[in-house]
Amino acid sequence: MKPIIEVKSDGPKAALKSNAQERTSNRQTFKVIRNDSRGEAAAKEMVKRITQSLVDSPEKVNVTVIHSKHLSVFEVSVGKGEAGQVIGRQGRTIAAMRKLLGAMAKKYDRRMVLEILD
């Protein structure tokens, strides 16, 4: 009678080794993101992606960063008439984005401000 499940000769050690390689590759990717000491690159990418998902014309979204010693100002410019989509009803959407940016700022011991330009 043949066994239903076949076990490969590599055994569980090979599986552990492949998992370790995956963790190493994940760690390297994380280091690339955290390489920026102020966290501006990751925060800029986050703000840009969220803003692009909210507006009708994502190709017109532009995020510029003005930074000083302990402060980074993110200026977001969108297409004409689309600022309201980013701000949201009673400013709830922009408030949520500012909360996320504040959490990132706390991680890097900085102050980050988000502004919408018309």
Image (cartoon, helix red, strand yellow):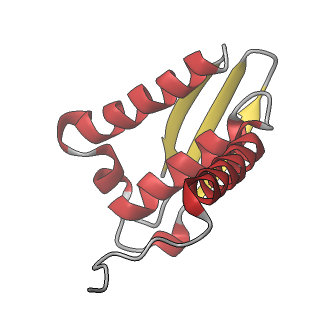
Image-based side of 109 in relation to 115, left or right: right
Residue 39 spot, x, y in % from top left: 69, 33
Q: Which of these two is toward me, 97 or 84?
A: 97
Q: Residue furthest front?
A: 1
Above or below, comparing residue 36 to residue 118 in the picture:
above
Image-based side of 11 in relation to 54, left or right: right
Residue 27 spot, x, y in % from top left: 69, 43
Q: Which residue does the image show at 29% across and 41% down from the upper left?
A: 93
Above or below, comparing residue 60 to residue 67 in the picture:
below
Q: Residue furthest left?
A: 89
Image-based side of 26 in relation to 83, left or right: right
Q: Which residue does the image show at 74% across and 35% down from the upper left?
A: 66
Q: Which of these two is toward me, 46 or 51?
A: 46
Residue 98 spot, x, y in % from top left: 43, 30
| Count of numbered tags | 0
Above or below, comparing residue 83 to residue 38 in the picture:
below
- Asked whether residue 81 appears in the rendered view, the answer is no
Residue 86 spot, x, y in % from top left: 35, 50
Quadrant where the image shows the N terminus: bottom left
Q: Quadrant of residue 15?
A: bottom right
Q: Which of these two is toward me, 86 or 80?
A: 86
Q: Which residue does the image show at 67% across and 53% down from the upper left?
A: 17
Q: Which residue does the image show at 33% across and 75% down from the upper left?
A: 5
- Asked whether residue 44 appears in the rendered view, the answer is yes
Image-based side of 89 in relation to 66, left or right: left
